[in-house]
């Protein structure tokens, strides 16, 4: 998908150039309206890394794109409005390309094509797995005895993953005091995992899953899920479907989120409240025993 932003940048730059040399031309204004919304959205997401979830259809951005598309279609139907018929044809083609990129991002690229997961389910015991902490092997059994929040994230390159972690960092304190453990697992190179652990000075375990072995075991491996071009930074072509798993002190899954869009991460209060409710239910049972 790195090709799409580059195309949009070229379209935006060329439209501005045409506006400069042709003065005020509605057709190039229309092209900008179709190309700018997605570019602005992507820049905002990548620079600020503050959006753990977005509306499925990005309604405000979609409205601007729709206005641009309607403008260019009207202008193509009444070419006499334009100063240059040939340029009007080019602007129509570039606007249509911008809209196609936008639609592809919203309805195709953002969607995660998960299959049915028969390994993870509410009420089931989470399978035993192995991950690594800076090269040291960690067995999942070592966390038994405490409620556990497990977040599988794609890597430092994913702004939605970073936003998800930021949001959790801002809300975890109370449950940490109650003994809840937090582990965040990614298939990215260990040096990247250590970098993010340093960035967030919190008592989370930032762990690595080399070659996606645990993700594959749990049915959340995303085959060839890395965006084109990112492999030059050392990331593997396979990544992981963003997943949140919460287990109680016995390792039973009490919350599971397998999002079907990488732009939609669950609000931490969803699963943090689930832990609190589960502890309230468990406590009387322990007292009776």
Image (cartoon, rainbow, N blue to C red):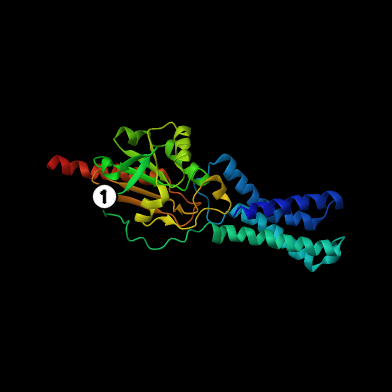
Find residue 58 and report its horizontal and vertical position in percent. Answer: 57, 54
Quadrant where the N terminus sits is bottom right
List the residue tagged with mark 1: 252
29 left or right, relative to 6: right
Q: Is residue 155 among what the camera can see?
A: yes
Q: Quadrant of residue 78?
A: bottom right
242 left or right, relative to 36: left
Find residue 228 and report its horizontal and vertical position in percent. Answer: 57, 54
Q: Quadrant of residue 85?
A: bottom right
At 61% from the left edge and 61% from the top edge, which residue is drawn? Answer: 103
Quadrant where the C terminus sits is top left
SS for callout 1: loop
Task: Farthest residue to the left: give it.
Answer: 289
275 left or right, relative to 37: left
- In this view of the protein, which residue sits in the foreground, 74 or 88? 88
The vertical placement of 84 against 269, above or below, is below
Rate crowding at label 1 as few (under 14), some (14 to 19) or many (20 or more) other CA atoms within 10 Å. many
181 left or right, relative to 234: left
Q: Is residue 218 among what the camera can see?
A: no
The vertical placement of 190 against 72, above or below, is above
At 78% from the left edge and 62% from the top edge, which residue is drawn? Answer: 90
Task: Farthest residue to the right: give it.
Answer: 83
- In this view of the protein, which residue sits in the foreground, 268 or 192? 192
Q: How many marks?
A: 1
The vertical placement of 276 against 84, above or below, is above
Q: Quadrant of residue 77?
A: bottom right
- In this view of the protein, which residue sits in the foreground, 119 or 271? 119
Task: Farthest residue to the bottom: give it.
Answer: 77
């Amino acid at each position: 998908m790195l090709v799409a932003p580059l195309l949009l940048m070229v379209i935006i730059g060329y439209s501005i150039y045409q506006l400069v040399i042709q003065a005020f031309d509605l057709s190039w204004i229309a092209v900008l309206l179709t190309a700018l919304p997605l570019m602005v959205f992507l820049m905002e997401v990548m620079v600020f890394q503050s959006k753990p979830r977005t509306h499925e259809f990005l309604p405000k951005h979609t409205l601007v794109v729709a206005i641009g598309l309607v403008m260019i279609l009207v202008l193509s139907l009444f070419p006499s409005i334009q100063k240059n018929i040939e340029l009007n044809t080019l602007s129509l083609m570039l606007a249509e390309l911008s809209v196609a990129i936008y639609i592809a991002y919203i309805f195709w690229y953002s969607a995660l094509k998960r299959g049915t997961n028969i390994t993870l389910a509410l009420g089931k015991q989470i399978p035993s797995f192995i991950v690594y902490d800076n090269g040291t092997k960690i067995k999942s059994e070592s966390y038994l005895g405490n409620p556990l929040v497990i977040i599988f994230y794609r890597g430092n390159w994913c702004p939605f993953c970073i936003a998800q972690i930021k949001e959790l960092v801002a809300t975890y304190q109370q449950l940490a005091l109650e003994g809840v453990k937090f582990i965040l697992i990614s298939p990215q190179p260990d040096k990247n995992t250590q970098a993010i652990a340093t960035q967030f000075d919190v008592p989370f375990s930032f762990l690595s899953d080399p070659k996606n072995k645990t993700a594959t075991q749990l049915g959340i491996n995303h085959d060839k899920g890395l965006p084109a071009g990112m492999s030059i930074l050392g990331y593997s072509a396979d990544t992981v479907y963003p997943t949140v798993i919460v287990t109680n002190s016995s390792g039973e899954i009490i919350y599971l989120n397998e999002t079907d869009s990488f732009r939609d991460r669950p609000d931490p209060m969803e699963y943090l409240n689930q832990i609190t409710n589960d502890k309230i239910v468990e406590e009387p049972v322990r007292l009776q025993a």
